[in-house]
Amino acid sequence: MSSLPTQLAARIQAVTGTDPQLRPATKPQFGHFQSNVALRLAKEEGRPPRDVAADIVAKLDVEDLCETPDIAGPGFINLRLRSDVLARVASDLITDPHVGIVQVEQPQRVVIDYSAPNVAKQMHVGHLRSTIIGDCFNRVLSSQGHTVIPQNHLGDWGTQFGMLVEYIVENRLDVSTFDLPEVEQLYKDSKKTFDADPEFADRARRRVVKLQGGDEETLRIWRILIDVSLQGFNANYARLSVLLTDEDLAGESTYNDDLPRVVDELEADGLAVEDNGALCVFVEGQDAPMIVRKKDGGFGYDATDLAAIRRRVNTLKADRIIYVTDVRQSHHFEMLFQVAQMAGFLPDDVEAQHVGYGMVLGRDGRPFKTREGGTVSLASLLDEAETHAAPNIALAAIKYSDLSNGLQKDYVFDAERMVQTTGDTGPYLQYAHARVSQILRKAAAEANPNVDPEADLESMVWGRISVLDEPAEQQLALLLSRFGEVVEVVANDLTPHKLCTYLYELAGAYSVFYEQCPVLRSTGEVRGSRLALCAATRRVLARGLDLLGIDAPDRM
Ligand code: ARG
């Protein structure tokens, strides 16, 4: 079953033969939805728009969903949903396992490339954003019935490991007892030595060759570095309560065996050419080429991403591939998609998208740095937020500020502000959910004094919404009925901030309802109907927060 506006739009399209661009009405007196299709058609046909609107309305078959349509102003068509329809749709949310989220007819296989931290370094603020945003996409697309295949493209390969392993061997260190911050320090120390001591640098380069050649001892140490790093990453994932698991790992090194073949193919096709000793693919309209094999014969980030996209299409059978990284990598992905298309790795019917996000800024409005000028670790950000609030609230605060602005925008990490339970914050929405829960809990206790106060509200039976006489009830039911439509938009455009805005509006509409319409103090059918409205609101808030990766507590 499609959402109400989708159904309405289809009805109008059946009359006009063109997309009516149905929008939520801007003011309550315009009803619930509005279309300007008559104005557009009138221009084409050279007729008065109000006449065109009248013709459309005369032929329109929406009686089962709407009151009689109005024609307003120069020829807008205003639609108001029938109260009984609103009541039915909102009531269904209480029992619908999908809470109104429309299940897609043709589920896709969607690869989402996110998180992707680098071995031997702690996850930093950028990885925080990638992890939170990617996880939200994962939840939203899964909720519609798509098969999501997360890919954690771990940075676990490259010449830096030659340097690091050489340093470990020469200093006879047992890194298996190290934690991630200690390994990161080692990385910094080895880099210092590398820069200062040309002989060490030579030995480090020879170590790279050993690593690539599969030398036992070198590989053994490299694997320990990965294990130690993964322990650190997994601790972060657990703290962030994201869906990523070890099964989603597909680090850069897993493409090593594919690289020579991928590059040979590019060369055989004439796409890759030698330039200054490196093998490059030049793309029209781009200044710099993609470097698929470096001067020294090694493969790098570009070649690895080509092998990855090829595997995602051929082996993982992706219909859609979404990459979540810093916006500064958008150029890399533009080139990647172009080259992959030219090489035949990315067929036309597979959609590849890069979602770039902005930077996290300090309160001074500058990129977030430690006092020493280093990058800020993800763990220290979580620690800071947790000095202001309990862990589940601190996490809600962070995730919501990450998702509630346009993703491309930079945002200021202001822990004190984002943990507030007032204003447009994650904790405010959690609080709204706790407030609705409290009413339901009281109602349950009134009905049965022996009810366990910790009983699961979700499993209790709430009646249906049958009375929507008050404007506040109408407004709340209308917003509830739009949840499915909002999720659809967010899934198509990858714009989580629209879900945030919606939930914020819903919490606001609930507040107005709560002030204007007594629930527990009302009686009879009205009381039952209002309790049902509360139950529907609670479910939509909980499901909506869950799609953002935010926990919805019953008490706060
Ligand atoms: N490891 C990279 C970084 O930290 C991100 C990798 C993103 N994914 C990809 N397929 N290139 O910036």
Image (cartoon, rainbow, N blue to C red):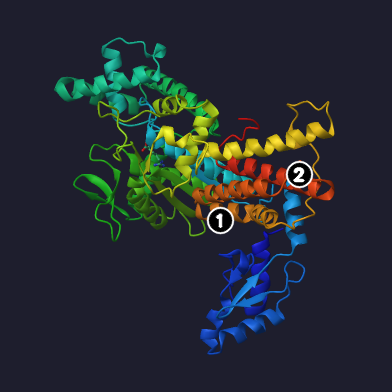
Q: Is residue 19 visible in this depiction of the protein?
A: yes
Kind of element beneath mark 1: helix
Which of label 2 and label 1 is nearer to you?
A: 2
User: Is 532 rendered above or below residue 158?
Assistant: below
Element on which disc 2 rests: helix
Percent across and percent down for residue 63 are 76, 71
Amino acid, disc 1: Val
Q: Which residue is mark 2?
A: 531
Between 403 and 203, the one lying in front of the other is 403
Dot 2 or dot 1: first in sequence order is 1
Pick the front one: 393 or 439: 439
Percent x, y for residue 503?
58, 47
Residue at 46%, 54% in the rendered image:
346
- Name the residue that disc number 1 marks: 489
Horizontal and vertical percent position of residue 409:
38, 48
Mark 1 C-beta closer than 8 Å to ligand 1:
no
Q: Which residue reaches farthest bottom?
A: 46
Q: Are marks 2 and 1 in contact (CB under 8 Å)?
A: no
Identified by mark 2, the residue type is Leu
For label 2, the crowd category at 10 Å Cα-Cα, with few meaning under 14, some 14 to 19 and many 20 or more, is: many
